Amino acid sequence: MRARYGVPLGIAAVGAAGLIYSAGFEPRSFRLRRVTVPILPSGMRPLRVLQVSDIHMVGGQRKKQRWLRSLAGVRPDFVINTGDNLSDPEGVPEVLDSLGPLMEFPGAYVFGSNDYYGPKLRNPARYLLEKASGRHGLNGNPPVVDAIHNPWEGLRDGFDAAGWLNLTNTRGVLKIDGGLSVELTGLDDPHIRRDRYARVAGGPSGAADVSMGVVHAPYLRALDAFAADDYPLILAGHTHGGQVCIPFYGALVTNCDLDTDRVKGLSTHTAEGRTSYLHVSAGCGASRYAPVRFACPPEATLLTLVERD
C-alpha cells in the first residue's frame, strides 16, 4: 500500500511546495542586478542608470513599495522606467508614492500596455501553447474592444510634474550632474501596436554625450530600427524574464517575437550591419491574475555605463 501511494503523494508534495514557493516567496524576493555597459566616449566619467520596469502594482503590496522606495539609496545619475507600472486601476497613487524618492533624480519613461489597459483573467497556459504551435508573439495585438481603461493620465501627470521626460514616440535630452547630457529616443508600446518609429527616425543627433533607445516591449521591429539608427544601447522590459523558467534551461516564452536567449539581461542586437547593446529587464512584478515567478526573481537593474573597450 505504501509503495502504491508513495510516489504520487511525493509528486503532489513537490508540486505543492513549488506552488507555494512560486506564488508566496519568489515574487517578493526583490533584488538589484548590476550590469556594466561599455558605450561611453573616451575620457567620460561612468554613468549610473537605474532601470525599473513591470512594477504591475496592486493595492496593498507593501513590501514591493518599500523596496522601490529604497532604490533611491543607490544614488543613480538618472532613472529609466520602461513601463507596465499598473495591474490595478486604483494603483496610481501607490506607484507614485513608491517611486517618489526616485523622482528626485533626473528620469524618463515609456508606458506599456498594462499602463493603458487593465489585465483580464486568461488561461496562463495560453502563452506556452502558442509558443509550441509557433504562433507566439507575432507582431503585437491591438487592445480588445472591451478592455478596461487604466487611469494612465494620472501616472503621466505625476511623472511629468517630477520633471521626468515622456518618451512616447518622441525624443528628449536629460541634463545630469556635471554638465553631462543624455539623448533619449522612445517608442510607445509595440505590444499593442502603438509604436511609431517614423516620428523619431534618423538616429542620435550627436549633440549629447551619450544616447539610447527606450521601449517597453522588445519586438524585433523596434530593436531593428534602433540598431540600424546606431543607438549604442536599447532598454526594454515586458518579458518578465520569462516569469516561470526551468532551472538550468531558462525561459519558455518572451511574450513577443524576441528569442528566449535574450529574454532578460544584457545582450546585443544587430541590424543593417550595426550592433547595439540590448538590456531587457525581468521587471519586479506580474499580472494580478498570474502573480507567480519561478527561477526568475523580481528585479531592478543598475547599469553602469563606462568607456568603450
Image (cartoon, grey):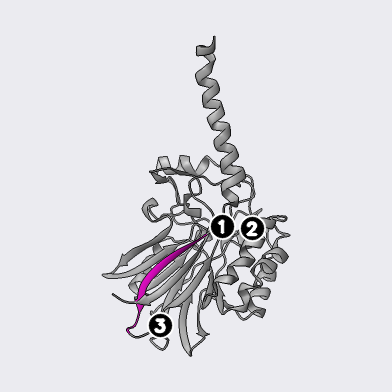
Amino acid bearing label 1: Cys
Q: CA distance from mark 2 to mark 1?
A: 8 Å
**Mark 1 lies on residue:** 284
Find out whether residue 34 is within the magenta segment.
Answer: yes
Q: Does the residue at mark 2 contact the one at mark 3 (Cβ under 8 Å)?
A: no
Task: State whether the magenta stretch is mostly helix, strand or loop.
Answer: strand
Is 46 rendered above or below residue 261? below
Q: Does the residue at mark 3 contact the one at mark 1 (Cβ under 8 Å)?
A: no
**Mark 3 lies on residue:** 45
Instruction: Pick the residue in front: 192 or 25.
Output: 25
Q: Is residue 199 visible?
A: no
Task: For mark 2, give the secondary structure.
Answer: helix
Instruction: Pick the residue in front: 34 or 252.
Output: 34
Q: Is residue 248 left or right of residue 59?
A: left
**Residue at (38, 56) in percent of width and height:** 262
Q: Position of residue 15 (x, y in %)?
A: 54, 32
Q: Position of residue 10 (x, y in %)?
A: 53, 24
Q: Earlier in the sequence, mark 2 or mark 1?
A: 2
**Mark 2 lies on residue:** 64
**Residue at (38, 43) in percent of width and height:** 248
Q: Residues within 10 Å of mark 1 (few under 14, many from 20)?
A: many
Instruction: Pick the residue in front: 143 or 222.
Output: 222
**Residue at (41, 89) in percent of width and height:** 207
Of circles 2 and 3, which is in front? 3
Q: Earlier in the sequence, mark 2 or mark 3?
A: 3
Q: Is residue 63 left or right of residue 16?
A: right
Amino acid bearing label 2: Lys
Task: For mark 3, give the secondary structure.
Answer: loop
State which region is magenta.
32-42
Q: Residues within 10 Å of mark 3 (few under 14, many from 20)?
A: few
